[in-house]
Image (cartoon, helix red, strand yellow):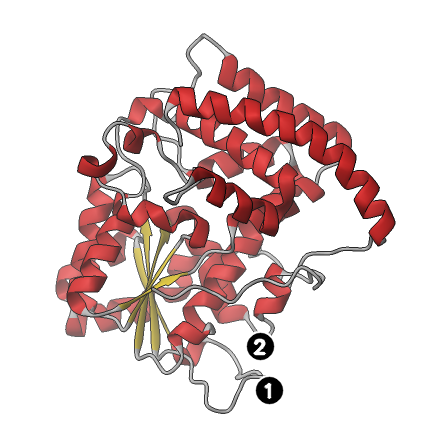
């Protein structure tokens, strides 16, 4: 299983591409290529193509070859993207159908290293807690090892937000009664069967949440934390509790109340996924790559794939700004760590009692 390089904490962030314009539609942009190829080689997948769940982007649509790219690097001949629902058994079946029909060299999943454990969870191994796991859960065999990675990449504030979102997301999705991420487990199993390399294609969630927090004013941060706590501790049923709520839908809900979150939570991740599909080292010289991701990302990812003019670079997609001096950083850190440390312990006890970790 391949993962992206370790992010640099010193690099500054520069968005390589704007978000898709309102008039852009990924289906219109890719339907002709996808239809033609599917009709010729995989007619059994035509239904997925017509529904917009499956698209194909050939290399000739990728844009110019960037001058900085190493001469021995070759982008994939074609990229297929399958849009899924993270709480659907049907999506898992579709992943298996597509991967066995296309037989790609690489399978890129909408997960990062911190969330890779989702692919290896099983009913027998984890039982009931599997139903409560979600895209924000802290994976891995040791909770505090996952905490340490989260702090190193995103900081204590991002970790606290992640824990809050893990509980909140589990609560509003509890009515679905489905284990989270079945399509990722299917992708892992089938990739092993067909000999495809599995690639972790999403930006580390720690960096995403850190950038989300930085995009908010102090007033907005306070309101967000209070609203999440209220949602978690409320004893009444929430309006969305009977329906499955995907991480993308949750991000959209948050962005409607806090518009500045749209860029770090959705647009930047779409660009990172596009980079993973066509320009990461893992897909070098690949013939065919298949991406498995939530349907909500398809428009942004397809736009990034075909609109990129050589600007999608790893350092620009994960860099984090740091303008503080060492002294001011230490002073702020002492105060912040004390407050957040206490909050993290309280959240840990809450999560442990609810079997979310």
Vertical relation: 34 (above or below) 248: below
**Quick one: SS at disc 2?**
loop
Contact, mark 2 vs mark 1 (Cβ under 8 Å): yes
**Dot placed on the residue nearer the N-terminal end, 2 or 1:** 1
Identity of the residue drawn at 44% across and 29% down: 169
Residue 143: % across, % down:
44, 38
Residue 31: % across, % down:
33, 64
Residue 177: % across, % down:
26, 26
- Residue under numbered circle 1: 67
Residue 53: % across, % down:
30, 53
Quadrant the N terminus occupies: bottom left
Identity of the residue drawn at 46% across and 76% down: 62
Vertical relation: 32 (above or below) 124: below
Judge whether residue 172 can be spotted in this image: no
Judge whether residue 266 can be spotted in this image: yes
Identity of the residue drawn at 70% across and 26% down: 222
88 or 116: nearer the viewer:
116
- Residue under numbered circle 2: 310
């Amino acid at each position: 299983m391949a993962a992206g390089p370790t992010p640099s904490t010193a690099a500054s962030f520069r968005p390589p591409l704007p978000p898709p314009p309102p008039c852009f539609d990924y289906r219109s942009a890719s339907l002709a290529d996808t239809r033609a190829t599917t009709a010729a080689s995989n007619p059994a997948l035509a239904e997925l193509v017509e529904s917009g769940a499956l698209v194909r982007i050939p290399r000739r649509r990728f844009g110019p070859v960037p001058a900085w790219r190493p001469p021995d690097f070759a982008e994939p001949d074609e990229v297929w993207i399958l849009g899924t629902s993270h709480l659907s058994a049907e999506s898992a079946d579709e992943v298996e159908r597509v991967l066995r029909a296309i037989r790609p060299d690489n399978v890129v999943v909408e997960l990062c290293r911190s969330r890779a454990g989702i692919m290896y969870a099983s009913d027998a191994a984890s039982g009931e807690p599997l139903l409560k796991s979600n895209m924000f859960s802290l994976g891995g065999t040791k909770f505090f090892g996952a905490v340490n990675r989260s702090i190193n990449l995103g900081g204590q504030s991002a970790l606290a937000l992640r824990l809050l979102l893990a509980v909140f997301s589990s609560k509003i999705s509890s009515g679905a009664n489905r284990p989270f991420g079945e399509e990722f487990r299917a992708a892992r199993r089938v990739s092993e069967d067909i000999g495809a390399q599995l690639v972790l294609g999403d930006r580390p969630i720690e960096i995403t949440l850190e950038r989300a927090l930085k995009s908010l004013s102090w007033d907005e941060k306070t309101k967000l934390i209070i609203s999440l706590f209220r949602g978690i501790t409320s004893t009444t049923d929430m309006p969305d509790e009977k329906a499955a709520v995907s991480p993308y839908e949750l991000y959209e809900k948050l962005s409607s109340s806090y518009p500045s979150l749209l860029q770090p939570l959705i647009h930047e991740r779409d660009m990172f996924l596009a980079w993973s599909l066509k320009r990461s080292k893992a897909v070098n010289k690949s013939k065919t790559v298949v991406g498995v991701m939530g349907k909500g990302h398809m428009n942004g990812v397809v736009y990034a794939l075909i609109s990129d003019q050589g600007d999608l670079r790893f350092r620009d997609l994960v860099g984090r700004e740091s303008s503080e001096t060492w002294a001011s950083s230490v002073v702020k850190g002492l105060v912040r760590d004390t407050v957040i440390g206490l909050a993290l312990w309280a959240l840990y006890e809450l999560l442990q009692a609810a079997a979310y970790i």
